Amino acid sequence: MKILKFGGSSVANAENINKVIQIVTQSPKRRNDIVVVSALGGVTDDLIRLATLASKGESDYRTLFKNLCEKHNEVIKKLIKVKNQKSALKEAKEKYNELEKILQGIFLIKELSLRSLDVVMSFGEQLSAQIIGEAINSRGVACKFVDSRNLIKTDDNFGSANVDIPKTYKLISNYFKKNAPLSIMGGFIASTNAGIVTTLGRGGSDYSASLVGAALNVAVIEIWTDVDGVMTADPRKVEKAFPLEEISYEEAGELAHFGAKVIHPKTMKPARLKGIPIYIKNTFNPQAKGTKIGKGKPTQDFLIKGISSLSNVSLLHLQSNNGKSIGEITAQLFDALCRFDIEVLLTTQSSHEQALSIALNSKEAQRAKNIIERAFELELQTRQMLPVSIKENLSIVAIVGKQMKGVPGISGKLFNTLGNNKINIVAIAQGSSELNVSAVIGAEDETRALQVIHEAFFGAADEAVNLFLVGTGLVGSTLLAQIEKQESPIRLRGLANSRFMLFDKQGIPLKNWEKLLPQGKSMNAQNFIDQMIGLNLPRSVFVDCTASEDVASLYEKIISASIAIVTPNKKANSGPFERYQKLRKLAKKNHAPFLYQTNVGAGLPIIYTIQNLISSGDKILKIEGVLSGTLSYIFNTFSKSDKSFSQIVYDAQTRGYTEPDPRDDLNGMDVARKILILAREIGLKMELGQVRVEQLLSKECLRANSIDKFFTVLKKLNGDFEKRKKQAQKNNKTLRYVASLQKGKATISLQEVGPNHPLFYLEGNDNIVSITTKRYNATPLIIKGPGAGAEVTAGGVLAGILNIFN
């Protein structure tokens, strides 16, 4: 024999109840089971509202009552064939009439006691049990309706009555000895020895199922819900939450205490005392194994069993001012709160400071403060205690598991995870049973905390990286193609170009992002960043593949939200030194990596190498390099060609090797930004204006009002460039546009370099950097390779993303 309890969404409507009936009737083995049901979806709330309206003398309750009757009649008509409906409708009508008389009485006397409210609420379970029982009978399966009020006996603590266990067990046992067929009964409702209706309070229907199961010593109690079992975390907040195979009664109780919608602790007590396992099953996925709640086998898979949270929490703080000891304060405090039935969710104390903090539901915070102030009135007046303070807008997150006992590092891992994600901890506590460790945090951080804690304790190696990309030009689009080919754990959650922005928490498909992006909203960089931060996803990384100052100006906000940045955009690092410095301080403070290796040399490890040299104690003496792939190509080609300089530049532009306006390459500012970044990396407080740049172009070239006009004017310089090339060749040298950093000064100029110079041997659009240090003195360290191009730049960005989360 089993007990099957269905409630909540399982009995929300006729469609769902049909699934319940299929589960109950699908196997002949079920024919001796006992089914416990809750009221239909929303009915209990409707009944409370009905009674409340009637007690206020508002005749509107009659309309609501009529709707309630129609709702039940509609379910009857959908569940039961027409030829079998008469009996069910008649029984329901009798209940409606009975309820109507009670409501009329409440309306007349304009009073609603807890006793009367219990009577009104009981009709929800009475009706649902009768209707579902008739529906089962109409399918050709015998099912007997059992009135719970005759079997479960309680005291008269209306609203949350206490069960007379011995008498209840005896009544249940005696009844079912004589009545073996499939039975159905309403949960939640009971009665006193005098026959007065009572209810069992929160979790009452589950409690009813547990009581019946314990009284009959059944093999299993099944609680059917809308999830596949007890989850590692709330799946509405943690996408990667998964069902547990088995947890202990104690673990389930701890999870429930801290907000998990598992099963109420009092529900489990009858089953636990009899050693009866409780299974949490899914009405909408009955094939799922579910979760067994029992004695709980130790498992080595994970250090914890689950994570839960409580919202709407306030923290009250009490502190002695050289008056009472913490022990005296605690005793007096809990005595006062207990007398007024205030539930304390968590306590934390400091013996040294003689201070105590308690967490409770925010609805009770002000009331609790008033009670405490009355209890400590003398101490507050005489300043033996400091004023009681309240901290609002908080949540509690807790990790739960038997295996935490005696295992070092669990708390440290929890707190490090929160700290590394810039989630401030207001208070901490550990249960005396060592089954839980909990932290009070800001309410705005609750969902993110659950996500990062879940990742820390349950995360797999392929946990998704949440990518937000701005810029879908050559580099951005190539990056997306590389991610798709690599089948990496990166998920594109946000995407934008100069016109549109698109978000999808489930991930934007990489195969057709180009078609989807125009379906998004108009692009606004500030709005994009706000929405990205608002999603509050763990392992988030922002990638800026633009050259936009507007986007770069938002880096501080992004890093302050503990979101990592990977960017080839040089604007932030080559802007004001104050911003350069602030970004690094923020990155360190907020544990948000800020990677910009591709600012100089695309995929070449130039910045990375310099950083490593400095961190290892070496000193940079000199840096020389050809830092522009475009200018490298132009002068490499010019040195070996008979073509004019202007023709070489024109060919490079038509092949897409330069910016649409070649002056953006030839004016030297791109190289200036790169050498400035390297100067700052070695510790120089330098601004862009301090970089001395030899201008390759005449003022007339720079002022040309069109690209065509520019090329016309550029031809005038062919003679000068040809002359310099011939002179270099005469000296057995070649022309290089060299950035140099030495003795605190940065210069950029067109130089002649010979075979003995590190920068002489260069091909195509390669970059080359020569780094002279104390250690690499006689022979400089050379880094050489492609320093431009979408493939290598995107590859460098992708490497940065993956390095952050490996």
Image (spheres, helix red, strand yellow):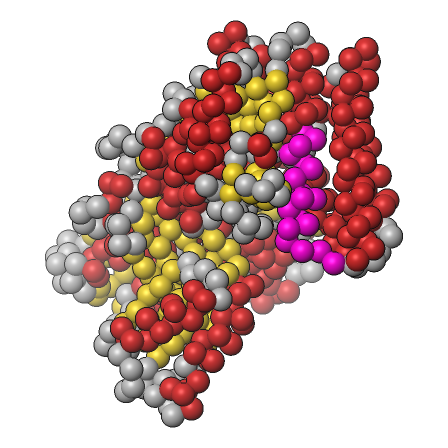
Quarter of the image that includes the N terminus: top left
- In reply to whether residue 23 is colored magenta, the answer given is no
Which residue is located at x 65 percent, y 20 percent?
A: 133
Secondary structure that dominates the magenta span: helix
Examine the image and state in which quarter residue 120 appears.
top right
Percent of width and height locating residue 743: 26, 72
Percent of width and height locating residue 800: 37, 46
Q: Nearer the viewer, residue 166 or 63?
A: 166
Q: In the rendered image of this protein, does residue 34 appear above or below residue 491?
A: above
Which residue is located at x 26 percent, y 79 percent?
A: 325
Percent of width and height locating residue 367: 54, 71
Left or right of 82: which side holds 135?
left
Q: Residue furthest bottom?
A: 382
Q: How many marks?
A: 0
Quarter of the image that includes the C terminus: top left
Q: Nearer the viewer, residue 251 or 789?
A: 251
Q: In the rendered image of this protein, does residue 325 appear above or below residue 627?
A: below
Percent of width and height locating residue 58: 84, 56
Q: Nearer the viewer, residue 407 or 469?
A: 407
Which residue is located at x 34 percent, y 88 percent?
A: 384
Q: In the rendered image of this protein, does residue 333 appear above or below residue 459?
A: below
Q: Nearer the viewer, residue 665 or 614?
A: 614
Magenta-colored span: 111-128
Left or right of 187: which side holds 679?
left
Q: In the rendered image of this protein, does residue 544 appear above or below residue 615?
A: above
Q: Is residue 64 visible?
A: yes
Q: Is residue 762 visible?
A: no
Which residue is located at x 64 percent, y 51 percent?
A: 115
